[in-house]
Each structure stands twice: as C-alpha cells, then as structure tokens.
Image: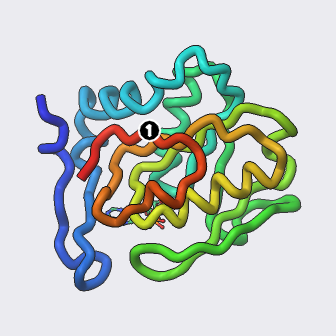
Amino acid sequence: MDYRELIRDVPDWPEPGVVFKDITPLLADPKGLAWAVDRLYEPFVGKGIDLVAGIESRGFIFAVGVARALGAGFIPVRKPGKLPRSTVRREYALEYGNDAVEMHADAAGEGQRVLVVDDVLATGGTMAATCELFAETGADVVGAAVLIELGFLDGAQRVAAPLHSVLLY
Ligand SMILES: O=P(O)(O)OC[C@H]1O[C@H](OP(=O)(O)OP(=O)(O)O)[C@H](O)[C@@H]1O
Ligand SMILES: Nc1ncnc2[nH]cnc12
C-alpha cells in the first residue's frame, strides 16, 4: 500500500494559494496510523531518547505513540497561553500567518536527549522555533521527525537538528 494515497490535497485551504495536506484519512486507517508512527520512531531506536516533544496540535497525534515506542516521556509544545506554569516562548512565521510556541521552562533538563515530532514541515518556522526553545533550556535536540516535508518550501534549512522526514513532497 502506498500510504500517500491516504493523504488528501485540499487546494486553497485555509487560504488561497495553500495546498493543505489532509492526513485525516491516514489517521482513520488502522494500518496507516501504525505505519506512520512506526516510520517516525524507527530511526531513533537505541539513540537514548529521554523525551519526545509533540507540537500542538497535529504533532501530539504522533508524538505520544513515538514516545511509547521509544520508552520515552512526552512533552507538549503548545500554542500561547495554554500552559499553567512558567513558560519559555518563541515567535515564528507560518506558511499562513504568524504564531508562537511555548513550553514549560522546566520541561527538559540540562543534557536530556529530546526528539521533536510534528506532522508537517512547511516553512520550518514551527520546528525551528521548537528546537531553539529546547536548545535554550540546555537540552540536547537529537532529532526532528515529521511525517510530511514540503520540500519546495525549503523548511529543512531552518532546522538545526538532524531532520527525519517520512514523506517528501
Ligand atoms: O513549517 P511551518 O511553516 O511552521 O508549518 C508547519 C506547522 O503548521 C501546522 O500547524 P498549525 O499551526 O496549522 O496547527 P495545528 O497543528 O493545530 O493544525 C503543522 O501541524 C505544523 O506544526
Ligand atoms: N500545506 C500544509 N498542509 C498541512 N499542514 C500544513 N502546515 C503548514 N502548511 C501546511
């Protein structure tokens, strides 16, 4: 099975000119979901990952499965104003609009080995900002894993950590 068939292109959503990659058919397919999680975590087996960070909200879907498979803990990286304690924050530009990511300042300790997971790498702003947040706290960002890399947007060059993309468009 070519699981790309379960990822739908939605033209001009959420705004004109953007072709949105809709992963909901892949998520709804039991084998497709397992395939996606397995392809995301496999390169990191044996790499001593302590914590897997998921980026709100679609990153959460995959990051918990990846954390379970690697025997690691999970860290939510959230949109602004969602976390109750002291946070660190980074602003970034999206393919459509601007946003920011936050995490608890004490989410990862000095030297802890972190893998950052998201569904899509587009301009790379979200992933780059997240990796910078972890580096700022003294964590060791071992890798960034995404299901989909939109290669034509050149986002990979903004990400300092080694990037693992399951599907390249
Ligand atoms: O590489 P970038 O250009 O930064 O874009 C990628 C980000 O955009 C999407 O999130 P979105 O902000 O749409 O939120 P969602 O996951 O809540 O749908 C996607 O899930 C990534 O996190
Ligand atoms: N084209 C796109 N499809 C799905 N998610 C995205 N996040 C940023 N750009 C995206």
Q: Quadrant of residue 47?
A: top right
Amino acid type, residue under disc 1 in the picture: His
Residue name at image x 53 percent, y 39 percent: 63
16 versus 159 height, above or below:
below
Q: Nearer the viewer, residue 61 or 166?
A: 166
**Is residue 144 or residue 16 the one in the foreground?**
144
In the drawing, does residue 111 fall left or right of residue 165? right
In the rendered structure, the answer to whether residue 91 lies left or right of residue 21 reads right
The residue that appears at 23% across and 69% down in the rendered structure is 19
x then y, percent, for residue 107 = 80, 45
Residue at mark 1: 164
Q: Name the quarter where the N terminus is drawn.
A: top left
Q: Position of residue 68 (x, y in %)?
A: 56, 24
Residue for point 70% across, 65% down: 82
Under 8 Å from ligand 1: the CB of mark 1?
A: no
Residue 56 shows in the view = no
Q: Residues within 10 Å of mark 1 (few under 14, many from 20)?
A: many
| Horizontal arrangement in the rendering, residue 40 relative to residue 24 (left or right) | right
Left or right of 137? Residue 61 is left
Number of residue marks: 1
From what the image shows, is residue 158 above or below residue 25? below
The quadrant where residue 136 appears: bottom right
